[in-house]
Image (tube, helix red, strand yellow):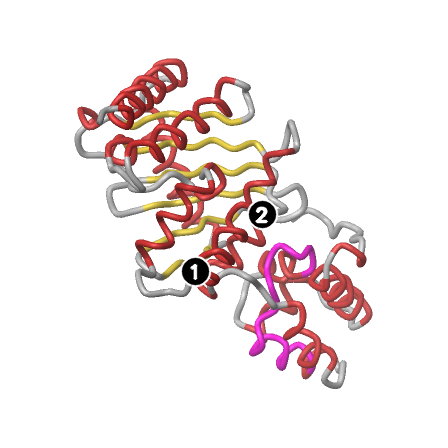
Amino acid sequence: MPGPKDLDPSTSPRALLGAELRHARIKAGLTQDELGEPLFVSGSYIGQMESGTRRILPEHAVRLDEVLGTDDFFTRNCKASNKSRYPDHFAEAAEAEAVAETIKEYAPQLIPGLLQTEAYARAVFRAYRPTAAEGVIDELVEARLDRSRLLTDPTKPLLWAVLDEAMLRRQVGGPGVMAEALRHVADLARRHRVIVQVLPFDAGAHAAQEGALKLMTFPDAPPLVYLQGPGAGQLEDDPATVTRHQLTYDLIGASALSPERSLALLESVAEDYAYEDEQP
């Protein structure tokens, strides 16, 4: 397991809490595996909490205070570090995504959040919440666009997305919105900022038919996989589970079109939508 990395406590409350956890663990003379045992988590999970990749959950904070003799330090402070603008089921994944070195994602129905335009994101959230106040939708869209700012760095994270053809054909927000959204993805691919493949309908049955998945690797922590369903999500660090889904991703990548053919298809479908949008 990689050794702990020095953190900059000014980066976030979670970084500060992770640094304090590492300090308290070392002071107590415990390894990450040894501290994980009374919490019923792996040593890698402890390492992810220390690196700020994963949040310290309230139930873990209570147990940490007991094991490490830190009074109620972690219990008091984990609430502030866990504040998030994202839904509970996605908050940990979004925060891990922000510090990931590589992100590999399979998207069966929707353009991945990091690649969405404002209009596309707004149409998605309005479909999810048809009766929500406009201000609520505005906040959700703003949070999603903030996530996409990860891609303003020219080199990291490495983002590799496999998009199901169903995602291209499903109209979200109408033809004009789709034309803009697909052109945005194609532009990112053409500028070599992301790698994009399309899994075509004629690929038939494939390894990821059960739903979306996101694989993330980190410079100082073990890899994670995020599995998502309707209104639910699960972040896994179990090595066997991660390895299984890495194979799943490799298999769908092998069945998908090449990046060059995928880009051509994206641009062709975008042109079709643009033409449709121009019709009276």
Direction front: furthest residue = 280
Q: Secondary structure at mark 1?
A: helix
- The residue wearing badge 1 is 134
Identify the residue at image location x=44%, y=47%.
242
- The residue wearing badge 2 is 146
Type of secondary structure dominating the magenta stretch? helix
User: In the rendering, at what x and y percent does residue 116 appear?
Assistant: 45, 39
Find the magenta span and give its range.
50-65
Label 2 with label 1: CB-CB less than 8 Å: no
Left or right: where 231 falls relative to 101: left
Identify the residue at image location x=41%, y=65%.
133
Label 1 neighbour load within 10 Å: few <14, some 14-19, many 20+: few
User: In the rendering, at what x and y percent does residue 179 appear?
Assistant: 35, 28
Between 109 and 244, the residue placed more toward the observer is: 109
What amino acid is labelled 2 in the image? Asp
**In front: mark 2 or mark 1?**
1
Left or right: where 33 falls relative to 231: right
Identify the residue at image location x=35%, y=15%.
264
State how far apart marks 2 and 1 are (Cα). Answer: 18 Å
Dot 2 or dot 1, earlier in sequence: 1
